[in-house]
Image: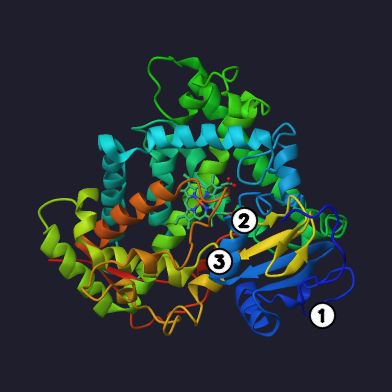
Amino acid sequence: KHFGSISKRNVPPGPWGFPIVGHLPLLGDKPQETFIRWRETYGDVFKIRMGSWDTIVINGQHAVRHALERIDDAYSGRPNFYTMKVLKDLNSNENTLAFGEFDSTWFVHRKLASKALRTFSNTRNHSVQDLITEEAMYMTDALLKHNGRPFFPDSEIKTSVGSVIYQLCYGRGQDVRKDDLFQTFLKSADEFIKFTGAGNPVDVMPWLRHIMPWKTYKFRQLVTKFKKFRDIKIQEHKQDFAIDHLRDITDAFLAEDLTDIDDKCKEGQISRNRLLSTLQDLFGAGFSTTSTTLQWAILFMASNPDAMKRVQAEIDTVVGSGRNVELSDRSKMPLTEATILETMRLSSIVPFALPHYTTMDTILNGYNIKKDTVVFVNLHSLAFDNNTWNNPNAFQPERFFSEDRQLDKEKANLFLPFGLGRRRCLGEYLALTELFIFFTTLIQRCNFVRPDSETYAMDGVFGLTYNSKPYKVSVVERT
Ligand code: HEM
């Protein structure tokens, strides 16, 4: 219910925090684990302070679904954190899709972005499938070039995953491996993730930028670099743009008639500049998430050779070795699907979604929550919930099976790697397509082996996405 004014009573409980900095120094290097401990003491909804920002952390299926599925959109905002202000400032003072506030223009923006992404990542005409398969083959060849010697696989993974979203956004048939701009972009993307993760001190205590000016300077430099990259591509597109031959998402945005927004959206006029800035969102959100998941997948396979052999047996039975895996094989490959789900669950790469913000006074689990409260949706708490999963820290793909060893879709819905509600991931369909084809192609052709000299750390590095720590692997061609 919407309350006009909410009394201070009945606010969520929470741990003690410091003056000025709040709970920031208490989060540790893995805030998701700290939150799990606090949940045990304070319950599913607890309150903390991030610098001067009142914040609630929402944990567990019940409370997360209750908050994100509300029809009044009380939790669909985004806070105006420092990094988000910089993004807006450098985008001619216009909001971006992923970090922008929740208003009528955002609705138009999301609708048009979704339409363009759907048009160019639609698997019905096989074209996207072909693109991903081509990149999966590139990736596999590149990994096999190391001839079984231990190496860090991240660069090969990032290049191929980056190439998919690059070609969808900026045109097919380009060889990103020879494109200096693209290579610079890849190097910068990791830095961006570090800046935008929950708990970045400068975000919630912007005065820190006067004490640590180099930090914010670097972030501004990064965003400027991304914007230059996008602007160069847009200029190139404008030169040979043809309305009856749209080649990619950039063309789709250039072609959109922004005076013809339908009735539901008429309050929210959107500028061409804002729409085109989506290219940055798609690249940022679509690249690091998928490549991080694949890096975890290889780590899990090399650490669990029996699980890898079971998936290989399924691929051999359904596909064999004489042809590429196709999306139409997916329904016959429950173990492969379960292994991808288990990889996503156990890596929990976006532990707190993107930060949300309340758009009105509201009530959750009986507590009063004020308008303008930062909300961390603890997706990690769903993925590791002891009440839902038996031994949640173990890698057990079969946990997603029904009794007849088929994929149990209800179990798959017990964690929410893509979030839920209005702000749910825009690229879920593309991400699942990519994960399926990349993963199966790799496993069909390669064995991933942990070198004797390596001990693998199963914990990762916290940022906007939760990355695996750098690791070496041996990749050996299957005979
Ligand atoms: C937002 C997960 C891949 C585009 C999000 C959010 C999550 C997420 C958790 C935040 C939801 C929230 O704030 O409640 C993932 C995962 C991926 C993935 C786990 C891959 C394994 C992609 C891809 C694209 C994409 C491939 C596009 C090409 C976006 C966009 C948003 C978003 C644009 C912002 C939506 C908004 O604020 O309206 N994603 N994502 N994501 N994702 Fe993804």
Q: Report which quarter residue 445 is drawn in.
A: bottom left
Residue wearing tag 2: 354
**Secondary element at tag 2:** loop
Decide: few, some or many residues near mark 1? Use Cα within 10 Å; few <14, some 14-19, many ≥20: few
Q: Which label's residue is closer to the chain start, 2 or 3?
A: 2
Disc 2 to disc 3, C-alpha distance: 10 Å
Q: Let me know if residue 461 appears in the view.
A: no
Pick whichever of labels 2 and 1 is earlier in the sequence: 1
Q: Name which residue type carries label 1.
A: Trp
Q: Which residue is mark 1?
A: 16
Image quadrant in which the C terminus is located: bottom left
* Residue at the (76%, 71%) spot, across then down: 47
2 or 3: mark nearer the eye? 3
The amino acid sitting under disc 3 is Leu
The residue carrying mark 3 is: 379
- Quick one: 359 or 93, which is closer to the camera? 359
Is 205 above or below relative to 176? below
Judge: label 2 CB < 8 Å from ligand 1: yes
Rendering quarter of residue 132 = top left
Q: Nearer the viewer, residue 119 or 287?
A: 119
Instruction: Categorize mark 2 by other alpha carbons within 10 Å: few (<14), some (14-19), many (20+).
Output: many
